[in-house]
Image (spheres, grey):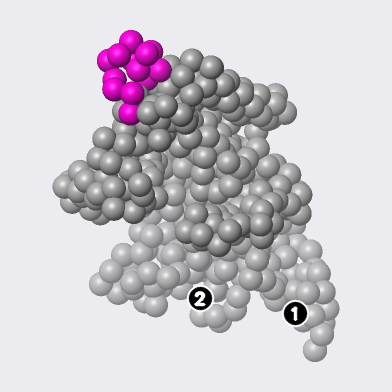
Amino acid sequence: MTTGEMAVPTPLTAVARVEPLPPDGAAVRRDDHGAFRAVEPGSGRAVVIRPTVEGLILEREASREVIPWDAVVGVDLLEAPAGTMRVAAARVLMREGPPLEMARMHTAGAEYLPFSLTTDGPPLLRVERLRLLIAATVAGSGCVAIAKGVFRPGERTLPRLDVTPRPRMLPAWTQPMLLLLSVLALVLVFPVDYSGAIAIMVVLFVHEYGHVVAMRRCGVRERGVLFLPLLGAATVPEHSFDSRWDEARVALAGPVTALPLSVGVLIAWRLGWLSDDLGQDAFRWTLVLNLLNLLPMMPLDGGRALMSVAAGLPIIARKIVAYAPAALAGLLLVFGTGDALTFGVAVFVVFAVVVTRITFRRHALHRWMEEAELDLREVRTALRDVSFALTGAVRDDVDGGVPPVPMTGPQIVGVIAMYVGILVAMVGLLFVASMIAPIVGEGGG
């Protein structure tokens, strides 16, 4: 029997528009991250649920149901009995007829879920990634939280929720220990003494604190600053960025700290408050480390700003922009001397390519939300509310998270202008310093 000859299953809702399935049927590809797999109770038949710009689409054997967003009048979160356990579930209320009811598929006790939540009620679908699907449904239908786990159209009455800090994975003494190990590693591996190594750590600390200040100004909570021996340091955010504009500004806030810090070091050095060796080392490392961080390669700050700017481009153009700097660096390695520096650069280029690939994989997880033209800020808010109702913790990074809002044209121009301005200012400081007292020269090493 062909797909067109299959009996059309009974619609799951009374408000949906029923259409025949396209020839490829309700298939889910490996890269089809916008499809939420579900299973009908009893029959075990597959249902593919897709949030789109027009509404919620339910694809089944021989037909698809299109539920327009204006037909959804509310969403309630609850727990379904499953033997001796309780499983997270949701009831999507319709303008007329029975609701659409769903429960989490991959969780303990899911195999004991009932056919429906109420007598003669609709079938209780078993769904993957339930939280993200419900968040997309809430945002797409224009509902807001009026109580914990209760979403309706209108004004929000539940207070805005702040992100719940994630459990600490490392003991408190880890950070000072890693800082000490970073100093020792620099002295043992590179031709610097302890004063030079400490100067590098100060530069890294000020650089990372620039990220911290920018995060706080953007409303992003920082999890902490982590020093990584021979790799530098990283400021870890507690949750995702609200927009690519915020992400790019936070990325550039680290290198911009080189400007006041290098000027302060230069003044202290020329006034004799720092010895020649320490003054030259501190000034040199302040600018060199931050200039390196501006290289447009992941996971450096310049690479993160570049990826934020390119996020709105078509995928092919985005990959060309992202991989071009690494390709250029690889080409320059052909002319390397084969020494330890060349080897280190080669390792970093490979690492940059790997991180870029991981970034694109995450972009693929996010692409469906952008194509569905959902309000990403509303999806993020809904995901926090849904996570809070189901787990008691406020998260926006569960089930794949929500992508930051893309940049506007003026914002892209602003990021490029900031990047060029910081770069020109750093090079200018190096030139001024060379006129006052050459960095490499007498007493400079």
Where is residue 159? Give x, y as percent: 37, 29
Characterize the magenta stretch by its predominant secondary structure. Answer: helix
Where is residue 294? Give x, y as percent: 55, 37
Give the magenta-colored segment's residue range. Answer: 265-277
Q: Is residue 29 visible?
A: yes
- 101 relative to 429, above or below: below
Residue at image x 52%, y 21%?
Answer: 434
Q: Please tell me whether mark 2 sits on a helix, a strand or a loop.
A: loop
Label at residue 41: 2
Q: Residue 227 magenta-drawn?
A: no
- Badge 1 local density, few (<14 within 10 Å), some, or many (20+)? few
The residue at which mark 1 appears reads as 7
- 111 relative to 270, above or below: below
Residue at image x 25%, y 40%?
Answer: 194
Where is residue 189? Give x, y as percent: 34, 54
Instruction: Name the amino acid, label 1.
Output: Ala
